[in-house]
Image (cartoon, coloured by chain):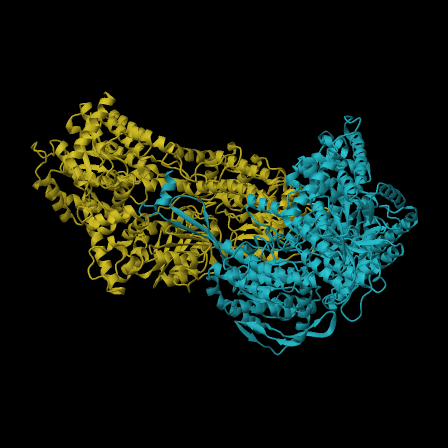
Chain colours: A cyan, B yellow
Amino acid sequence: MDREHLDAAIVARGRQFFEAIGDEAPSVFKKDWWTGKVMAACMENEQFKVQLFRFIDVLPYLTTAESLGRHMQEYFGREQAVPAALRWGVKGVGLGGRLAVKVLGAVIRKNLHMMARTFIAGETVPETVRRLAALRGQGFGFTLDLLGEATVSEREADAYAGGYLAMLDGLEQAQPDWPAIGGAGGDLDWGHAPRVNVSVKPSALYSQADPAEFDGSAAGILERLRPIYRKVVGLGGYLCIDMEMRRLKNVTLEVFRRLRSEPEFRAYPHLGLAVQVYLRETDGDLERLLAWARTEGLPITVRLVKGAYWDYETVIAAQKGLPVPVYTVKAETDAAFERSAEVILRNQDICHLACASHNVRSVSAVLETARALDVPEDRYEFQVLYGMAEPFRKALLKTVGRVRLYCPFGEMLPGMAYLMRRLLENTSNESFLRQEFVEGVEASRLLESPAAALARTAGACGDGPATTAGAAAGPAGEEAGGLGPFGNHPFPDWTLAPQRAAYRGALEEVRRHLGRTYPLFIGGKDVTTGEVADSVNPARPDEVIGRVCQAGTDEVASAVAAAREALPAWRDTPPRERAAYLVRAAGAARRRMMELAAWQTLEAGKQWDEAYLDVGEAIDFLDYYARQMVRLGEPTPMGCVAGEVNEHFYQPKGVAAVIAPWNFPLAISCGMCAAAIVAGNCVVYKPSGQTPVIGHTLSQLFREAGLPAGVFNCTPGRGAVIGDFVVEHPAVSLIAFTGSMEVGLRILEKAGRTPPAQAAVKKVIAEMGGKNAIVIDDDADLDEAVPAVIHSAFGYQGQKCSACSRAIVVAPLYERFVERLVEAARSVRIGPAEDPANHMGPVIDASAQKKILEYVALAEREGTVVYRSDVPAGGYYVPLTVVTGITPAHRLAQEEVFGPVLAVMKAKDFGEALAWANATRFALTGGVFSRSPDHLQRCRREFRVGNLYLNRGCTGALVGRQPFGGFRMSGVGTKAGGPDYLLHFMDPRVVTENTMRRGFVPMAEGEAAAV
Amino acid sequence: MDREHLDAAIVARGRQFFEAIGDEAPSVFKKDWWTGKVMAACMENEQFKVQLFRFIDVLPYLTTAESLGRHMQEYFGREQAVPAALRWGVKGVGLGGRLAVKVLGAVIRKNLHMMARTFIAGETVPETVRRLAALRGQGFGFTLDLLGEATVSEREADAYAGGYLAMLDGLEQAQPDWPAIGGAGGDLDWGHAPRVNVSVKPSALYSQADPAEFDGSAAGILERLRPIYRKVVGLGGYLCIDMEMRRLKNVTLEVFRRLRSEPEFRAYPHLGLAVQVYLRETDGDLERLLAWARTEGLPITVRLVKGAYWDYETVIAAQKGLPVPVYTVKAETDAAFERSAEVILRNQDICHLACASHNVRSVSAVLETARALDVPEDRYEFQVLYGMAEPFRKALLKTVGRVRLYCPFGEMLPGMAYLMRRLLENTSNESFLRQEFVEGVEASRLLESPAAALARTAGACGDGPATTAGAAAGPAGEEAGGLGPFGNHPFPDWTLAPQRAAYRGALEEVRRHLGRTYPLFIGGKDVTTGEVADSVNPARPDEVIGRVCQAGTDEVASAVAAAREALPAWRDTPPRERAAYLVRAAGAARRRMMELAAWQTLEAGKQWDEAYLDVGEAIDFLDYYARQMVRLGEPTPMGCVAGEVNEHFYQPKGVAAVIAPWNFPLAISCGMCAAAIVAGNCVVYKPSGQTPVIGHTLSQLFREAGLPAGVFNCTPGRGAVIGDFVVEHPAVSLIAFTGSMEVGLRILEKAGRTPPAQAAVKKVIAEMGGKNAIVIDDDADLDEAVPAVIHSAFGYQGQKCSACSRAIVVAPLYERFVERLVEAARSVRIGPAEDPANHMGPVIDASAQKKILEYVALAEREGTVVYRSDVPAGGYYVPLTVVTGITPAHRLAQEEVFGPVLAVMKAKDFGEALAWANATRFALTGGVFSRSPDHLQRCRREFRVGNLYLNRGCTGALVGRQPFGGFRMSGVGTKAGGPDYLLHFMDPRVVTENTMRRGFVPMAEGEAAAV
């Protein structure tokens, strides 16, 4: 194949398309239409685009004129300020006030509905079937897709699958009336393609899909997909499995392979899969897929698309610190499209190609490559989205004949997500359609080969494609030598089989080391004691994780003495050197990532994600505090006056006692210890009695980092025996505590007493409980709010101080929320955390179990328990519980449960919801789901908690991004992982030097005075 | 007088001088000499110059080879690193190690001694007299000046005066042998000038001189000057009163006027005065002086000089926030010289002129102006410094004949200050001598008229002369509108008669308002109570300052309720608006400056300076915290990841109780209240029971600022009645306290208990006591150390938490220090603070008096009381007490006295001194006087106190420059007036918004992710 010749042919083909298209614009860009005007406004004004998109997003929830009017005003300003584009077609505006807004709102709603109809084939099956018939009459094939809400529960997955089956019923009835397209006779379009062609979104078929649980997720999807496919097969139809977010890509590939190769379906050829070329992984995926098809001898179909979630994938990767999985330069994606198409065309014997693009260059390339490779025409077809690029689809139909329209159908409300994606595509700067039809970019540029475009762009902006995302890029490892900017440890990527295997391997490895005996660590030496306590697996209490030596007051006293002895040298160690120890400890933790997480799964009952992120947070604390200390270690000049030099700097407080909880057994322990240590204090660390083995791993990390003896001491023991002792010890200057309010207040009280022998007023850093609320406004996006509440309330069994334990729902949305929530809750699988199929595990111990069960019983008395799960036998399980009818007067609205018990409260309006949210003694985290700009703004100030989250769940604060901690009874107003945190571990000092001697001042200062 | 013609004549005259000088360089610049080499090195390398000057400064104290060697190394590095210039003349170096350093040290000491001899006419009277005779033999007159240490006590003043008399005895004996110069016959040189001519420094004659005490200072100087002058008159000699720092300029003018016009001396004409033209005030001073002479009909003499304390005056003004009193551009001073000279020459009938300058242009100008004005030759003469510009003085002698050399004599050690000034002059960039003899600047430039030079420089650098100093310039007033950068309120300038008069006026005004009744201030309203307590003048306990209503628990409860009620609106008031209230309060305080200070003098017994600076500090707190809050009020973005926006900001803690002390009755009260208020809290303020009327003035300031009702409430009352109540009140979230350790610890303990009704864990900001030490190293400059210790220990009767109560002296300097210290202490006058003659006043009340007297008695038991002053009758006076023989084991080394009792401790070396300094429960302030770079460096780290001062006293921290506060038992590690202070009054919050909706992220963030 002569590349140069081929490229010339592609360009020539493209020019023919352009000629065929002529001056005709797609309907969305026609400016004599409302849609066209609005699109034009969006393309001119980014701010308007943002507001409009968000307004469109919320519109289906605005069911009253009041609500519609209010949002109009919040998004676009007062009536007069509403942009002309939006007001177009509104008659009688100028009446002023509420009436005008009402009229305007109604017209806009109607117009947006019309706009949606541009892209959506119909709202009901009969309507859609009629539309499909009409399209077929024009010579277009179709593939039908059912729009849907996000599937947050198994019942919703059932409903979605049911919708598909109903849709197929409708098609089944209509099919006989449809003559085949292409005039080849028989039942097949163009002589080879089924007339009924449907696309299905796998994520909608299983609410609990999770990349960590690879097999189970595939099985869950298949369970509902199989009846649908069976029906398709029965109709002689074709099914394409759509590809959505990368998160489920590998699971979807697995679903395809399994379905395609199941004995029942092996013989039936009409199963396809969408492949997104914007993913960097696609080259490999495609190669493996084709190899598999060839090995199995199973012909397949691939719908080749560029990918519709670019923003999402980019942002999520950035937020998780993962490599950006998509190409960041458009031409790279275009090149990948041509590359993948060629690969498929070269494998046409085993793989049929559906080329799905509106890009004239891409389509021309496929067409000309196919011809150059002599690919038979029945081995490839072209697909175009319904409602888009109509002039092009006509030209395409005229040229190649085999054009299929991708037709979504369904209700307006669930269709919004789809509409948004289409609007994004049409108005993005890099949209081919925008460039072609709006910007009027010249044909030679539009038809340029992707390679040439890449070379040109690289030349122009001088940097190659980025591979990692924004600021979160690259953990600054110890190898880096100096300390670069801080970045969070990346999230796990369970889509990758090696990561899953590594975790399973780590669990096995850890299990081989269970039951060992662990000493104390004092003054750089292991110390054993007579008393030993067992730590057990909460999912299997007869499994002993480790036997841990227990410190008594003697051991604590010698640990304090060791810390005291180490203090002078350590506090005078330069901050930069102290920081280097932390970076080394972070390196050690990174190397043992999976193993450290696995200990948590077994000792603390943490799910894979939870355990991994806990270790990641520990690493973050080490990396972050190291950098903060380097910053704070530099003396700051104060004032600027000749003849005097003032320096403000910090020194450590002395010996610090760290009393840690079990729920973030490594992260919080590590954070408090690391902060104390890097600030120059010496630490006596008491890990939680529930997770002492994990506490021991922290010892190991600091040992590996080479901390001088006595700087870090580890004394596990019973709180009742050593708690007060260490708090009251006169040599202890600082107590860093995270745990319950009761214990925290006790420590504060004891530390408040200063006996004569004590060197310093004791400083207490106490992070205590929470009774956190998520407010669901009446315009909340339930697709996001329901999973966020589920995750915030039941993640790690609700055993987080940040956990959501109250969902406060504004009345109009109450019923819908509760219904979806309960079904979502019902879908959560419960069992040992080591099995990623279980999204909820056991609580930490029998005492927690007992206490939580008492609250479950209280829930029965105080409200209506609308859901109470079953629990597995054996471990310390408690039922996942949802209780409604709770008001601020109830104990369940006031007391921290620290378990999977969610109180749902119905507030009459947003103001009441906010007031209720604030109406506890705690002030730790909170969340708000709202799409009202004013309400969001109001919350920022009035929802008074340490960490407030707008439109996301209320757990999962990240070091450096969401400095964590609350006030009132939730804590003393420190912020772990924030810029001020280390200040609490130090005392400020100022040194002032009079630099004038005998009237002589060194020049620099003298000059400053003279000018 | 034709200016143009005159200027041409000046230039011509100058050229003649240059011709006469030829190529001859002054000895200090001769490079074949050690001095010349060192000067050259200084001019090349600023850093070396600094080190050398400092080394010269300390050299006289380096009495052992060890000490000399150590300092050599510290200042110049290891032996090999000592600059070649310094090593010149050293033989046998290269032996290495201690011996080499010893040899080097000895040679350098000898060379420096030689260098000093260049400028100093002799070390003893006989030697000096011989030298003077030789100079007279060459045709030069002289004026003799006695070098001296700073006079820190009356005994030293006596000694200095005695030295003068001895000097005069020597001259008396020699005079008969001296033929008159100028061949006019008779006893007078040049026919009109006494042969004996001496200069005297008035500051050396009275140790307690103080611009605030104008009359007394003049009288004190005159008392010792009169016998000297009487002796001069007896010798038929001439006396010139030298002018030193501006601080005593007006007093010196007054001394001159009084002495000149006293009946005993009126008839004797030979009294002169030095006038410094670099002072901007000089034009006016000179005019008034001449007018006075004319009115009195008394001929006078003026020695016109440019001024030798430019660095000092500039720096001190900058540090005090005062206008720079000197011209900042050299040409301005040159112009002033010519201007003043002309004024004097025009008044030659009443005023004789001594033109004292090495500047060829200035001298030529005087010469030509005198000729142009036909001034008789006996009405002006020329003076040149001994040892400087020898070629010029020769040329001058040849030209005009009447040349007098200014000859210092005395010991090397006290001469160092003089040597330093000479070195500075010779090596400064603007030195005429340097320009002429070293830089080789061309004659036309050197002879340029000052006006022309000014025009040229202004053109070149584009800015006019500065009038205020550096960063401390200009208090940002409310009138300024916005908030400019913070600057401290200026210090008082008691040299100005209107300021002194204003203070006296304010005292009278306040006294007219004594005895009023003061209500509480609650919820914006005055509230009176049945119980009223009297506040009295501690210097005169029968004088009632005010009758103050006393709050009981009911009143405090309603104040808390009022604060609570005001809170929601206040905490939501934008930080910038809250800051504006503080700026308005600062404006109100500025307008009432003197009156507010006067209240303190009467109610708290504060000296003028102390009272004024307290009000200034209150203003500083208002101005500073306002700006800090504006800074902290801006939310800080956290992290930088697409799709999420994190904002970190602060909210107030709630209702704050402010419990204030009496010793900084406005400043500390105002600081704590202002911080709480501007941070958004509402305040219940309990002023000290000793200073409730001053507390009331704070109320007035906040009322004047227009604070909303309830934001600030004032409830004076007895601590025993309301203290615990307000601390334990469940609605109080924050307690800001400054006072004793006992009360502070009690508050901490009570606040540590959190009853169920309490909303938040109480935050306590406690500033408590100190037991502060100043360490006197063996190389300390006692001229500075002794006054600093006196001021730090006895200023405001030692009633400062920052006060020095221990002087720890390194053994070799112990005897000299104690001797000078005791004499200095003996010189402190004690009496009511309203009389500025008294540098110590009464303590606050009878109970303080009793407690301090107990410590004085303890001092007798624990050590040796080396000084115990008498006390005036009537008020709450205690003796100023100095006790030696104290070690860390004594109570006097451990307990806070809070009165004028200073324990002196003798440490064997610097290490022991540091260890002792740290050996108390407190850690507030400290000071070190040392000229060892290594020791100073070591202190920075190892002298562990909140505020450490190197080579200055340990009191007087300024807002924004020396953030104030300590740790251990001195406080909880906050820093008033520092950048972190407001953080303690607030809780941090973070709001995180997920900005992605339906996969769509607003462009700015999306782009960030893509790049």
Query: Is residue B864 shown left or right of residue A112?
Result: left
Task: Identify whether A439 is placed above or below A735.
Answer: above
Q: Residue furthest top?
A: B2
Give whichever of B346, A47 is nearer the camera: A47
Give whichever of B622, B499 is nearer the camera: B622
Task: Identify whether B589 is placed above or below A769.
Answer: above
Q: Position of residue B422 (x, y in %)?
A: 25, 44
Residue pictured at 11% horizontal, 34% vertical: B188
Q: Position of residue B487 (x, y in %)?
A: 46, 40
User: In the picture, residue A740 is in which quadrant?
Assistant: bottom right
Give whichever of B500, A167 is nearer the camera: A167
* Residue A566 seen: yes
Q: Residue furthest bottom?
A: A530
Give whichever of B422, A406 is nearer the camera: A406
* Residue A935 seen: no
Query: Is residue B287 shown left or right of residue B771?
Result: left
User: In the picture, residue B68 is in which quadrant?
Assistant: bottom left
- For the C terminus of chain A, give its image quadrant: top left
Q: Position of residue A515 (x, y in %)?
A: 67, 76
Task: Identify whether B802 is placed above or below A436.
Answer: below
Query: Is residue A610 shown left or right of residue A648?
Result: right
Q: Position of residue A649 (x, y in %)?
A: 47, 53
